[in-house]
Amino acid sequence: MNRVVLRWMLLGLVGYLLLPWYVLEDGFWGFSWLFSGGFIFDGGYAPAWAQVLFFEKSWLAPLPLFLLLPLAGYKRSSSDPIFSSSLLIAGVGGLGCLVIQGLSIGIDGWEFSFLNDLFGPLSIRQFGMGYGAVAVALPFLFFLTQGIAARGAIRGDVFVVGSIGLIMALIVTFIFFPLSHILVSALENEGGIFSLWSFFDRFASQGIWGLKCLYGGGRCGVAWNSLLLALLVGVSTTFLGFLFALVATRSGFKRVRLLKSLAVLPIITPPFVISLSLILLFGLSGTVTLFISDLLGITPSRWLYGLPGIWLAQVLAYTPIAFLVMIGVVEGVSPSLEEAAMTLRAGKWKTFIDISFPLMRPGLANAFLIGFIESMADFGNPMVLGGNYDVLSTEIFFSIVGSQNDQGRAATLAIVLLFFTLSAFYLQRRWLGKKSYVTVTGKGDSGVHPPLPTAIKPIIYSITLFWLLFTLVVYFMILFGSFVETWGLDNSLTFKHYVTAFSAGLDQRGIYFDGSAWNSFFTTISIATIAAPLTAAIGLLTAYLLVRQKFRGLAIFEFGTMLSFAIPGTVIGISYILAFNVPPIELTATGSILVLCFIFRNMPVGVRAGVAAMSQLDKNLDEASLTLGGNSWYSFRNIILPLLRPAIVAALVYSFVRAITAISAVIFLVSSEYDMATSYIIGRVENNDYGLAIAYSTVLIIFMLLAVLALQFIVGKRNLGRRLRR
Amino acid sequence: MTTKKIAVRFEKVSKIFDKDVVAVDNVSFSIEAGSLVTLLGPSGCGKTTILRMVAGLEFPSKGKIFIENEDVSLLPATKRDVSMVFQSYALFPHMNVAQNVAYGLKASSVPKDEIDSRTEEVLKLVGLTGFDKRLPSELSGGQQQRVAVSRALVLKPQVLLFDEPLSNLDAKLRRQVREEIRDIQQQLHLSVIYVTHDQEEALAVSDRVIVMRNASIAQSGTPFELYETPNDVFVADFIGDANLLDINILSIKGDLAEISLGNNKKLTLPHKGLVQNKIKLAVRPESIFLLDQDKDAYLQGTVAKISYLGSHLEYLINTKLGQLFVKDKNVLRPFSAGSDVWIGLAKHGVSLVSL
Amino acid sequence: MKNYPLIRYALLVGTFFFLLLPSNSALAAGKLNYYCSAQEDWCQLMARGFEKETGVKVNMTRKSSGETFAQLKAEARNPKGDIWWGGTGDPHLQAAEEGLTVAYRSSMASELNDWALSQAMSADYKTVGIYSGALGFGYNKDLLKKNNLPAPACWKDLTKSIYKGHVQMANPNSSGTAYTTLATIVQIFGEKDGFNFMKALHKNINNYTKSGSAPIKAAARGENTIGIVFLHDAVKQAVKGFPIVAVAPCEGTGYEIGSMSIIKGSRNMKEAKMFYDYALKANVQSKALEVNSFQVPSNKNAKTSSKAPKLSSIKLIEYDFQKYGSNAERKRLLKKWDADVGSLPR
């Protein structure tokens, strides 16, 4: 029994005795209950004990028993079995109690019909869990993990076991739990009754797997459409990214930094903005189209709407990501290996094919995987440019919001999509196998990368230059489009769109913002600002556990953390709405649901960044800290975190940017009070207000650019003059 | 021997990784307080795992570990009064020397002025006064090593652990630093466990050496015992160089056995309970005299190769028992390659070992 | 840790008295969660106007009617919204049918047009019409001229082979507008001929869009020639200055009734009803003109824009909202469309 256990117990007691047990109607930050005084006797605000005594919530009665149980281990050492058992029982019992009552008693009595049959109807209802429940749940989780740690798991490390427990609990609650809802609805027929048959019926449909386009006309299934698109995009982005990486590292090109910062642009571009720009360029009445048709007398066609258009937009959007992935790998190939090959009489070309290229395999595989998955999950571009080319992500969306409103179909399509993305992950792992590709060692490597073989140099140069120019033109169009009255109709320059969206002024009361975009802009910024550090923190903590700790279930743990990356936003959005609209966890229409959605959707990136950075930190560093008497939390804070600064920035920037540019999940989760920029913009696009939409996007791009630069500036400076490795 | 305090005791400890990789197999030993004990063995023999178990960085799969008679088998590293100097030093690159040294004191909430005085004191001890504001990257290898030592020392641990502390230093510095470590250990009466694969280093610094092989203890003893009377071929060969010869046991009288190397000159040595088919004779290269005549010789051979090393000469001698490696201090009278020599044996450095 | 016994004592006593304070349950009065499925500026206009008049704080969410319906369904067991205003009538009728909305008979009923009342009646007063708009199509006159095409005037014209690749409509599976088109065609030509018409039209369609008004927006930007949409959407693009001409088909046409419903389980029922009455007022509906909404308001006394298509000049059919708004009929027609039309090659 120690102080820490007592402190947690105290928190639990506060939760049980003082805090409102159920979620408050006036929102998480509503503190009116506090100032209303005698809230104990108000059913909406009462703490748990009052709920038991005055409001017949008898199922909350056993909780204090478990809360106080660890007292049995009072004054006992942590290796005493009574200490660990009392904690274990308290943790398992308390959490079990909470979960069971939460899942089985809901907003209109029993949640499951068999309970109704067993105990008869229940007239008392309960809402979602609030402060009180959270304050009670946390100590239980702590008891459980502390109990496990006391049993000697993971060298008895309370912090590590606790972190694993916490992250497991979060993953289960915010990834597996919502996903299970969507899977369940895939297995239900229209009447909401479990039926395996209806799943197979939906699954086997022509709409998904049909191959009519191959013979005798007709359309192919969405599954094939998505797969074809994703493969094309994956290959193209990898190829282009690879070429750019070669130019950047092996051609004497000096402006690598500039290229890298340019590559950030598409990442901070809200989705579908590229599509809009492409329409303005290549649409039926696009600038380029008209120019060419006038010049050559070709009838303009609608080629942009469909596979070619989506492909083009996605390749524009994801090539820079592929480039950023590839450049690390291309740079990482140790020059001395290449030099060794050349001294062994291999020509430049042979060296490249036999040595350099195979060593870049992991980069190629990663770049392809990212392109593939991003394309699969992309929603904005197919939405705008799809034409008749249906893909899974839009089909899922329209199965739910369309006039058919078929949740089961959406869920089935989501499963197909998930199957594709997870298979891609699996194949990537298989292909890379267990070969070691680590060529960056601690030893100084002073060689120089050989230049590109002269035969292919001009080809590579012209392709990359063309693509670079193309990208710049697309971005120029975005900027230009925001200053034009009405694109294509009235090309006079104007600030109108910016004024409509962002007008602000000063009067006697101070600054006022009366532009139509301010509301969603401020919401977006604050949500992103809250989500980013949390995402980075959870991501890095997870990375620490994955890299530095070995425990049973590590593989499942990793799978859970990476799962949400492979799930398209639409699916996440729907599943969050399904799961968190009803007790035990009520979050819909709050800002919290957006924050949570972003955290768990973007967490994998934080994890990846953390894992990569942490694998480069000598494990002895944290062990040294441990043997010097700093516990693992102390070591994590004082040793690992300071050394992970670049990874922290990467995770922060990425999650911040993703929270601002996300669309597919957000569209389901925004509410009256919390409207996001992207959902506002898509509303403008729907309304043919391209000018306003593009102006808003431009502002977002510039804002994010400044934010990213500021972050990099602050953190980059601190790292000067300090080498990370000994 | 008087009952000295025991600093560390292993009781039938095993460590198994990933269910079937046995890193340490049923090992028991104890280490007296105030002594320096070396774990010596080839890489992968389990010596570092033992060290990490003492530190609390690994927990034993079976068996118990005691530090000053307290069972610490399941006590996390943080709570053990043990410090460790890592092979890579593991200096925190973002902290300067003083911060590195003060780290452990800070973690255990020692008052500020005590931290300062103790840090200063220990830096003085290792001769790094004035370097306290430098970053590790601005120090030489030897200086980094000393920071690592002082960081561990400043906590005044019950047990101090060294994991191959000298492997990153060049040969000259290695000798100097190992003397310093030994001095500090003697001066402060520290209990030290020291891991190395360098037998010379082990012999030079240790009170006792534990030789490890394949996850278990091959032999333990003072450097003298190990060098002079190795138990088996492995120890004989691993510590120093040894010529291993097939011999015949002629007769056994009590603890002694009479053996012959092939001619009629006999040799009497303790047999340690070994039997004919599982026995070899281990002879240190410096225990062989090269004679130019048959008198007092055990064996005859021909010089196959000769190399001059300044302090001594090294010969390879072909005999009917195989090739012998010989170190001869007499550099003024070299035998030339191809000439016949006779082999004489010294009183020390010759022992019977098991296969 | 240091002890501050006095402070602890004060805290204890303070907490004790605090807990005994009388409860003040009159919290946050006057709040309305408003789901809007019309265009953004119209939604804003309604929300701000209501706030100004009543002092009730309005939280607005703008989503298409399909999305809002999906949200109502998802939130059915724990509704977050109070009132749903705007958007085509079908999802409102569906919501009524599924019991997601509640009946309310406004005192304003006497001022409403007959079509609005009959729709309300068919839904047991769980929804009410706030505006109506006739179906039709619009074309881009510049593009038509460029391609040397005659202006279409009737539904039948659209199936002529000269328009191949020039017509756009939404996919009835995803869009209420397109479903209204399908139902209208079936009602004008009868089911058999109606589907033959759809098959013929299918050959000319260059793209089935997801959203109902997308075809005319594409036409406005010159990305498409003819779009089958609601006339007010076409007029709106013309008013914005795009070269769009709206056409009321000669065979007659169906129409939608933009509706309003109170969400079942509303936590602010009083405010929801206040909004309901407010939205049916003549002066409120007249304000739609400020935001270029060219639908016909449901209040007889509300002003109509001169640019709006006159319902009187349009041959409106007797649209059977009850039949074609029902889930069963909708599913049947959509399935048939998918099988007989949508899957055909073009």
Image (tube, coloured by chain):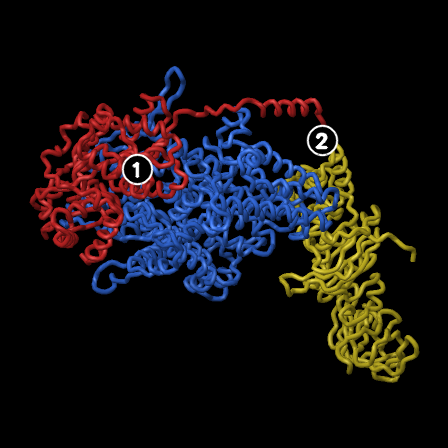
Q: Nearer the viewer, residue B145 or B57?
A: B57
Tell me, what hue is chain A?
Answer: blue
User: Alpha-carbon neighbours of circle 1 within 10 Å: few (<14), some, or many (≥20)?
Assistant: some
The residue sitting at 41% across, 62% down in the picture is: A349
Picture coordinates of residue A391, whole percent (x, y): 31, 53
Task: Residue at 54%, 22% (x, y): give it.
Answer: C22
Where residue A512 appears, as percent x and y from the top left, is 38, 22
In this rendered view, identify the residue nearer to me: B18 or A274: B18
Give the answer, above or below, for where A561 lies relative to B235: above
Q: From the viewer's perspective, tell me whether residue B306 is left or right of residue C308.
A: right
Q: Please tell me the colour of chain B.
A: yellow
Q: Callout 1: helix, strand or loop?
A: helix
Residue C345 in the image: state x and y as whole percent.
Answer: 19, 58
C183 in relation to A36, above or below: below
Q: Which of the chains bears the disc numbered 2?
A: C
Chain C colour in the picture: red
Which residue is depicted at the point 80% across and 56% down?
B9
Point out which mark residue A451 bears.
none
In space, the residues marked 2 and 1 are separated at their CA atoms by 57 Å
Measured as percent of width and height from the top left, residue A184 is found at: 42, 53
Is A279 placed above or below B284 here? above
Answer left or right for B194 relative to A349. Answer: right
Q: Which mark is residue C1?
A: 2
The residue to which callout 1 is attached is A683
